[in-house]
Image (spheres, helix red, strand yellow):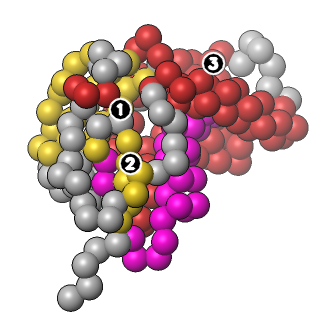
Amino acid sequence: MKLHYRGKYDLDPNSLPVAEEKEGAIQFEEAASTQELAKKANIAAFILLILLLIPIVMLHRLKADSFAFWIGCLLSLFCALPHELLHALCFKEDVYLYTNLRQGMLFVIGTEPMSKGRFIFLSLLPNLVFGLVPYLLGLIYPSLSLLLGLGWSSLAMGTGDYINVYHALKQMPKGALTYMSGFHSYWFMPEQK
């Protein structure tokens, strides 16, 4: 994997890396722009925050003055770059890192083809490391409220990744490969040998 930092994304999809089109490739039915994706992801994040707060309140009776919990939430912001680096590590070839802080996003794009399983793993890995594991540990062990805050906030920040997983699971048939090109993802059936 070779990481290239491309700086601030200018909202022009033509400025993103483009893959060589694969024969028979089908574009995912997904958001048409980063603005549309950000809107959907932010709504989903808000709903997820509420749903994930229910077990916290039921198990821990969390109070607004739980300092460590709120520090954990703040730490999730500092995990945004490591989150993207974990995505990047799942690529074998060139991967490009962009920032889009106006819409609350950092993202990576790589154009290499990969299996549905690898794409799902790539999408979920940072959410497991910074989100689910700390969240569950914090629920199990009340003294780890810092991790609970980190996990709670990080899980919600990963909604764009969950949207990608949903599209892959819903749209890709068994044996299909996927790749990113520009702002969109595509799937295709590899040639049988």
Which type of secondary structure does the marked residue at label 3 adopt? Answer: helix
Residue at the location (26% across, 64% down)?
A: 23
Q: Which residue is mark 3?
A: 70
Q: Which residues are magenta?
A: 151-180
Amino acid type of the residue that numbered disc 3 sits on in the rendered structure: Trp
Q: Position of residue 68 (x, y in %)?
A: 62, 21
Q: Amino acid at mark 1?
A: Phe
Tell me if residue 144 comes above or below residue 189 in the rendering: above
Give the dominant element type of the magenta stretch: helix, strand or loop.
helix
The count of marks equals 3
Q: Could you tell me how far apart the alpha carbons at marks 3 and 2 are, in whole angstroms?
A: 35 Å
Q: Does 96 appear above or below 71?
A: below
Give the amino acid type for the residue marked by disc 2 in the picture.
Answer: Ser
- Of the numbered discs 3 and 1, the one sitting upstream in the chain is 3
Identify which residue, 191 or 7, lies in the foreground.
191
Q: Is residue 131 visible?
A: no
* Residue on which the image places disc 1: 107
Report helix, strand or loop for mark 2: strand
Q: Work out whether residue 104 or residue 183 is closer to the camera in this orientation and state it.
A: 183
Residue 76: image location, x then y, percent: 50, 26
